[in-house]
Amino acid sequence: MINLKQICKSIFLAVFFIYAAMPLSAADRYSVSSGNWNSTSTWSASSGGASGASVPIAGDNVYIESNHTITVTANAACANITFTGSGGTLNVNLSVTLTVSGSITLNILETGNTSCTISGSGSVSCANVNTGQAVYTPVQSVLLTHTILSTISSFNVSSDINLNSYKSGPMKRYANFNLQEGILDVSGSIISPGPPPKSTFSMETGAESGTLVLGGATPFNVSGADDILLEGVSTLVNYKREGNQTVLDETYTNLTLSGSGTKTLNGVTVSSILSIEGSAVASGTTPTYGAASTLQYKGSVAQTTGIEFPATFTGSGGVIIDNSNGVSLNSDKTIESNLNLVSGYLNAGSTTLIFQNSNTPIIKTSGTITTNSSTNIFFGTTGNTVGAVFTIPPGTFTSAPIINNLTINRTNSLTLGNQMISVKGIVLCNGPLNTAGNLTLVSDASATALIDGSGTGQITGNVTIQRYLPVGFGYKYFSSPFQSATVNEFGDDMDLTYWFPTFYKYDESRTSSGWVDYTTTTNVLQPMVGYAVNFGSFSVPNTVDVTGTVNNGALSLTLYNNNNTYTQGLN
């Protein structure tokens, strides 16, 4: 049998749990003075009321009154923050996070310009930022501004920044958001939603060192009347969405295109660094670059150059390759300053890569250049021959490179690095080239490389020259391209000790046949003199190589006719 006491107890518990399950009503908290967020002496339950209200918690609405500075010293949360007047400051200490589930709003006043500051070394996150109320009707016929200043280290906005400006005849209220330093990460849009009064988003005030990270599909939703000022001294704007974005047609100090998808550029100017990161791809029109600009490729996803890399990049900062999985050129390129190989590699592919004018055309940390047999490499071009004495850094190429043509147009000497460069086409030198023993002229069934004799430059250092023989059997006729090579250069391609002579020189002065056994390895191979060489009895193709210092300039040879029976004018 249930007694009355048990019934009362059951009713009490039911009411208790129902009450406990009900959400608490949001409280309003107004600052009464500057102070610590976590102190009850800072807060009142009403505007102008007495202090002593409880500290704001998640779900509460916070109002920071005029000229009050509220400092957050421990992690905290609330629903919304409103700056009710001018001069308010929200300061968040280092390693502290303030989470605002709703909006941060600066109210407009009719008594004058208004502003507030969000500062500190900590972090603030919110859903929206409103510079001015969403609905407002000006009263006085004057121009007033309302400005949010952001200097906090980390400011994360999960939705939008609304620049709420208003105009009704002579009554104007202009909204400003000034990112002066720190990182502002906006996942939605920066919006100027009203009719055409002017709103301003600026990175060109204060320290001018802010970073703006844009994650929205439409990062800026503004009108032509608005001022978007992004060219602070060391500012950075990063379009980072995982998907397509349109880049605002403005001038940027530093611009990063990251995330993924296509980033569309039209009318963009970059004065310092344009960095392509992630799998983002640039489309549209090529940016205008400032004199001190740099083009950088960075990340770990393989990249291919696009419209961001003009045919000639003139920025003095050069081109930086910092991608562990490599960057491939999509067309012929000229770099007027330098190529900086930080990490990964630049795949030149079947393009022409021209290093123009720079004293140090290649800077290497740990990156490399990858080539193939269709790659053409130029150091300077006709009429552009400046540049100091330069040595290609050791290990510049991914492996011993093979290229098509190598052209030198430099007044001062260029020295090859520590890797053998094999050329399949033409070496043209209109300036001094020191091979350092690392140049090979390749010969195969399709073609034989050569040094273009029209060049005005000198080649020093050893060169290895190949000659492809479609059939190895029998005597072949050679002349030396070198200044002081000896017969020994052929020793690794034939048997100089065979019982029957395999290497002959022709002597026109002999009264009998002019052919003379010339197999002694120290015999000098004279330029413009012919030799007959027997490479054995095998009919398979053979590639002969000889090494020495090439002849430079014009050579002359006296021809003889001793009018003998077998040598009448043969030389």
Image (cartoon, rainbow, N blue to C red):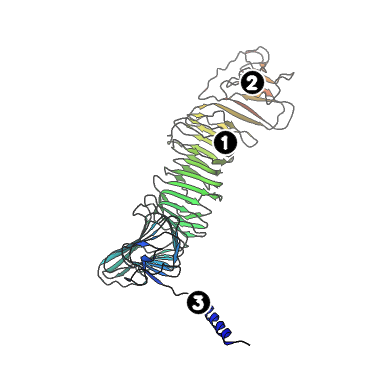
**Amino acid type of disc 3?**
Met
Q: Which of labels 1 and 2 is toward the front?
A: 2
Q: Is residue 512 left or right of residue 256?
A: right
Residue 347 as seen in the image, left or right of residue 197: right
Total marks placed:
3
Q: Using residue 136 as the reference point, say whether residue 396 is left or right of it.
A: right
Q: Earlier in the sequence, mark 1 or mark 2?
A: 1
Residue matched to label 2: 487
The residues tagged by marks 1 and 2 sit, at their Cα atoms, a distance apart of: 26 Å
**Residue at 73% in and 31% down:** 539
Q: Secondary structure at mark 1?
A: loop
Q: Is residue 68 visible?
A: yes
User: What residue sits right under mark 1 in the picture?
Assistant: 425
As measured in the structure, the alpha-carbon distance from the residue carrying label 3 to the one carrying label 2 is: 102 Å
> What quarter of the picture does the C terminus occupy?
top right
Give the amino acid at mark 2: Val
